[in-house]
Image: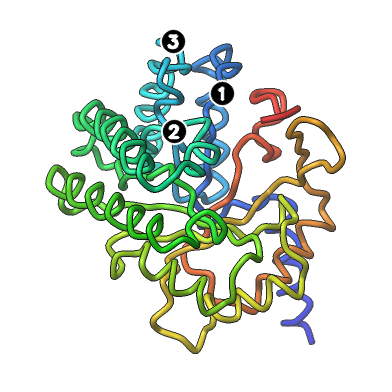
Amino acid sequence: MVRGILVSVLLLFSINATALVKDSWVFYQPQLRDVSVTKAQWQVLLSELKQSGAKGIVLQWTAYGERSDLSIKQDEQLEQVFKLADKMQLKVIIGLYSDPDFFSRIKQPTASLKYYLHKQKVLSLKQVDKWLEYVNSTAFSGWYLTEEIDDYHWQDAGKKNLLMQHLTSMKEAILTLTPKQPIYISAYIGGHQSALNVRSLFSAVSQQGQLKVLLQDGSGTQALTAEQRDYYFSSLLSCENDSSPISGTVFEYFRQQQNVDVFNALPPSKAQWQQQLKSMGGYCNGDKFIFSLRYLPYAQGILASKSN
């Protein structure tokens, strides 16, 4: 009885205080508006993450758009964040190039899609080259490919084959440069295919485990009902299955606001977060990732979160 009460108190403390990030990776999605964040503010923010037991931070991308929409100042800021994290003994996963029009571009015909994916590869490898000077740091913990994979856009066999060729080519090029570092990629489910087909897709994406697939839990976007989530996650995150293609789970620490013209999100309430943890507690989630830093209590007053 006493032990049960103690466990409950400790659980409540972990939810309220070290809010969320203990033993977790935390995604940071760079935005131009963040250029006003000072070095001192980043020190405070990263220190809070460290003290709360976070493993490290994922820079979701280090280049955004062909026109380099991330300013030179922000480019320097990302390098500064890496160095600060290193000093605090936090790990860092480096995201590569991100195209803001990715999901509209991949709708193009198969014949032209291969050229688009090749451009994605070239621009991403450019970022690998740029960040190579940091790979020997103890903080560096791998690369993150920004191509989020879903169960809708790759149903066509020809497009799926192109995707696999693209990922294989990216993987081989990166491993040639940094053979011992992991490569991560995220995926989400919209309910467009059967659980069996989704598992097959994500297994192909994982390249026999050489790409670490992170499954987004969908709580923030609310794309799936509870029943749909259990249908898919029971297949992908079953504790009785040792051959899952999923290496980790992204817990979405935000709630997308519905019936608005532009994307807008807010942090979840305490009750929403507790329910989210409870609903995911029956699965073997692998490594835990939180999306995103912007909505965490530590970032309030430092990183704006009105919309992103």
For image coordinates 64% across by 60% down, the residue present is: 190
Of residue 178 and residue 67, the one placed in the foreground of this image is: 67
Of residue 204 and residue 37, the one placed in the foreground of this image is: 204
Q: Tag 3 or tag 2, which sits nearer the N-term?
A: 3
The three-letter amino acid code for the residue at tag 3 is Lys
- Residue ID for mark 2: 98
Which numbered dot is residue 31?
1
Query: Is residue 92 visible to us here?
Result: no
Q: In this view, does 118 lie to the left or right of 221?
A: left
Query: Is residue 87 visible to us here?
Result: yes
Query: Which is in the foreground here, disc 1 or disc 2?
Result: 2
The three-letter amino acid code for the residue at tag 1 is Gln
Which numbered dot is residue 53?
none
Q: Are dots 1 and 2 in contact, CB under 8 Å? A: no
Q: Tag 3 or tag 1, which sits nearer the N-term?
A: 1
Q: In the rendering, at what x and y percent does residue 174 appear? A: 21, 45
For image coordinates 41% across by 52% down, the residue present is: 185
- Residue ID for mark 3: 73
Q: In the rendering, at what x and y percent does residue 258 appear? A: 84, 43
Q: Helix or strand or loop: what does disc 2 sit on?
A: strand
Quadrant the C terminus occupies? top right
Q: Helix or strand or loop: what does disc 1 sit on?
A: loop
Quadrant the N terminus occupies? bottom right
Q: How far apart are marks 1 and 2 (CA)?
A: 12 Å
